[in-house]
Structures are given as C-alpha cells and as structure tokens.
Image (cartoon, grey):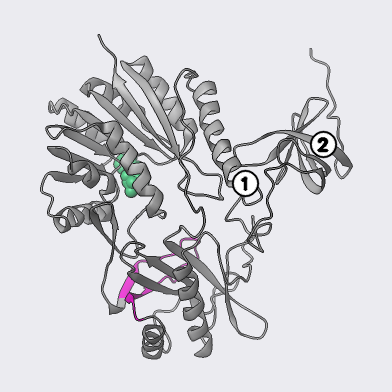
Amino acid sequence: MMAKVKPPVQKNETIQVMFEDLTHEGNGVGKVDGYPLFVPYGLPGETADVKVVKVKKNFGFGKLLKVSEESEHRVEPPCDVFYQCGGCQLQHMSYQMQLDMKQKQVKDNMKKIGHLEHVPVHPTMGMEDPWRYRNKVQIPVGQKEDGELMTGFYQKRSHNIIDMDTCLIQDEVNDRMVETVRRIASKHGLDAYDEQTHRGVLRHIMVRTGQNTNDIMIVIVTKTKKLPHKDEMINEIRDAFPNVKSIVHNVNSARTNVILGKETNVLWGDEYIYDTIGDIKFMISPKSFYQVNPTQTKTLYDKALEYADLRGGETVIDAYCGIGTISLFLAQKAKKVYGVEIVPEAVTDAKKNARLNKMDNADFFVGEAEKLMPWWRNQGLRPDVIVVDPPRKGCDEELLKAMLDMEPERIVYVSCNPSTLARDLKVLEDGSYETKEVQPVDMFPQTSHVECVTWLEKKEK
Ligand code: SAH
C-alpha cells in the first residue's frame, strides 16, 4: 500500500512559487516539492507570492498576490475589467505568447491523446490586430440604484453584471450601438429585467454587424410581449445610426439563461443583414449561426480550401456545415458539394445562401451527420474529399467509420477542440489515413480557445 502523502501546502498560507508552465486555460503552474499549484495569471519564468486557496490530494489552486520577478511576456491588460470579467483569459500575456501557448496546446494533445508526435503542428496563425474582432455582441441589461440602465458582462462564475462601456474584443460599432440603445431605453424609462424576481422588461441588447458590408442589425430582447415606446425608440436609433439595416424585437418570457426567445418581430427594415467572406455573400438573421471573427474565418477557410486541393472535378462532402459557409467556399472549386447539418433553420439559410451566390452545385440536407454519412456510403456515394467541422465533442464513431469506408483521397478536419481532434485523428490513422499537417488558427484572441484545420491523405496501398 502506498503511504499517504500529505500535500506540502496548507489552505490560506502564503508561499513563494516559481511558474514552470501554463495550463490550456492559461493558468500558471508552479510546483511545490513536485505538487502542482495552479494559479490564474501566473506566467512561466515568474516568481511570485501566492496565497493557497484550495488544496486537493494531487493538486491545488492559488491566488496571485505579488509578482517579484516578471516575465518579459507580461503585459498590462488594456481592459479595465479584465480581472473581473469572465470573457477573456489572456490579456495579461503578450500576443506572441498567446499564439505559442495555443500551438503548444495542440502539440501536447497530438502527442498525449493521438500519439501523433511526428505530425507537424504549425505556428498559430494570428491576427495583425488582435482586438475589436467580434461581429456579434449579446449583452445583458441591468439597472443601477438611481434607475439608470447599465450593460455589461457577467462577473466570473456569477450572474452579477459588471457595468462597462466598452469591450475591447468587440467591433467598436457594436459598443456604440449598445450604448445608444441603452441610453434611449433609459430615457424612456424602460426597466431592466431582473433574473431573481423575474420582473422587468429589457433583458438583452444584441448587435450583429457585417464587417465587410457595414450592415448593422439590432435585436432588443424583452420579457414582455410589448416593447414600450417602440416608435420613439425606432426613430431615435435610426437618427443616431443611419446605417442600421434592421431593428428586431425578440420576446423571451421564460426563466432561462438562453438569450433569445421564440418570438421575433422585425420592427423596422430588413429581416436579414449581409456579410461577405472572400467572394461569397451570406445572409444573417438574429438566430443564424455565423462565425464571430470574419477576418480569421477567411484565414481558416482559405487554409481548408488549400488542403482540399480541388481541381474542379471533385465531389465533396461538408459534414456539420452550419449555414453552408465552408460548403460554398468549396463549391467555388468543386464539381459538387453535399452539406449535412442537424439544425433545420441553418439548412434553410444554407440553401438561401447558395441561391444568393447563384451557386447550383451545392446541396444541403438536414440530418445527423453520423446517420446520413453511413446512408450515403450505402447508397454508393464516393466523395473525393470530405470536410468535417464538428462541435466540441468531435466526430461520432459511426461517422469516422463511414468516412474510412468511403475512401476519399483527402480529409480536411476543422476543429474547435484539440483533444477530440487528436482522438479522432488516431482513429483515422489506424484506418488508412495519414495526418500531414495541423494548422492552428487564432479565431478568438485574448481567450484560451484555439481552432485547427488538419490535412489528411489516404495512405498509398
Ligand atoms: N462549418 C460551419 C459550422 C460549424 S459549427 C461554419 O464554419 O460556420 C458545427 C455545426 O455542427 C453546427 O452548425 C451544429 O448545429 C452542427 N451539428 C452538431 N451536431 C451535429 C450532428 N450530429 N450532425 C450534423 N450537424 C451537427
């Protein structure tokens, strides 16, 4: 029997720690006699005073008190509420360190989970300016003591709203729109919705912008069926921002964390706004899934297209296709693209987007990719290239099996979760595919998320 080893630290004591590593969330890792202590905002190479806040059998958590030796990669977070807000995790480190950390995270997963240490993982493709990139904001509305409305994000692990005027990862236009709508609503005496009592009116303000078209959509979410002072609100918003294309009222009367309710009414203007990625135009409605960082989406899709290496005669499957963004990118270069997606509204949007771009070589189907792919296989469909872009949980086993059976020349795997990516690549490698390259792309600067696009080729027999 193993002797019971007591952790070498005690709760609430203050100790000096040197950080050796970073976790995938961006926390510093210090070792005390081999016992790992995870400390938010600690950076490798730094020595700091840390207060121990949680002690578990094999690891603990600490709070950073004072850094005595600073890393050259430490930067002053430009956002005033960075340490309170739950939105960003990495503003205290240089952008280069963020990119390096994400590359390392992917490499670690490839090695530990996929046993694919030989596969090249390229340096993360970052943004020239890693701020102000988000094209969509959904911000909760609260109320100050004096009755004024406020907007802000939730405090970490809580539902308290932090009053804030600007969010540095949001498009500046979104910031200004939120501020304007809030000011107008305040002026007309609208009350904020209160989660505790389930009373009040205004729940969220949502703004979507087409960064390449300058279109703006405003969605006002209320608990009540009626939007008080509707006409004055519309006129004043339009006066303040003439390029608003669409003002929408959404009703959400439920006790829920979900932001949008079922009922959506266009108050003024169009039902959709537009944006472009490369040469393709997309329609965006309040509920459509659309990538939030269009600049990096273009980078990601260009890479996917390069890996797909289409010559014009190919049949391609795009599984988990959403509103057809990748599918239409591929359809520019392929003979035929089949998209499959589980959300019916997204498939409707995908079909509309194909028509909007006058592309008649892309067909979209509603269904579970793990059911439709084996069915296609049984029908004898043999695509030349398969692209997958699954949610965080990765691909279903049935889908991986169907892909192997279909024997495409190439597979392009787009992933927002390196650990399920590595797991699935292992299955494909154990089949007859070879992973050639993994390219991490920074879709969400200042946060710990990383996206990857991976190229696989069928092995020579
Ligand atoms: N490729 C798209 C969307 C990727 S997000 C883009 O780049 O914009 C992943 C998509 O997979 C979502 O649209 C989600 O609705 C869909 N999805 C989730 N589970 C699915 C399943 N089992 N079968 C098919 N689609 C699924």
Name the residue beneath numbered marker 1.
94
246 in magenta: yes
Mark closer to the chain start, 2 or 1: 2
Q: Could you tell me the amino acid type at mark 2?
A: Val
Asked if residue 50 is positioned above or below residue 176 in the image, the reply reads above
Determine whether the beta carbon of the residue marked 2 sits less than 8 angstroms from the nearest atom of ligand 1.
Answer: no
Residue drawn at x 58%, y 64% as measured from the top left: 153
Q: Position of residue 404 (x, y in %)?
A: 27, 21
Q: Tell me the crowding category of disc 2: few under 14, some 14 to 19, or many 20 or more residues within 10 angstroms, Cα based.
A: many
Quarter of the image with the C terminus is top left
Quarter of the image with the N terminus is top right
Ligand 1 lies in quarter: top left
Q: Give the left or right position of residue 262, taking residue 310 as reference.
A: right
**Count of numbered marks:** 2
Residue drawn at x 62%, y 46% as measured from the top left: 94
Q: Which contiguous range is marked in magenta?
A: 242-265
Q: Position of residue 151 (x, y in %)?
A: 56, 72
Judge by depth and name the residue closer to the eye, 18 or 139. 18
Element assignment for label 1: loop
Location of residue 319 (image quadrant): top left
Asked if residue 64 is positioned above or below residue 265 in the image, the reply reads above
Name the residue beneath numbered marker 2.
17
The Cα–Cα distance between marks 2 and 1, rounded to whole angstroms, is 21 Å
Q: Could you tell me the amino acid type at mark 1?
A: Ser
Residue drawn at x 39%, y 80% as measured from the top left: 241
Judge by depth and name the residue closer to the eye, 42 or 340. 42
Q: Which mark is residue 109?
A: none
Location of residue 198 (image quadrant): bottom right
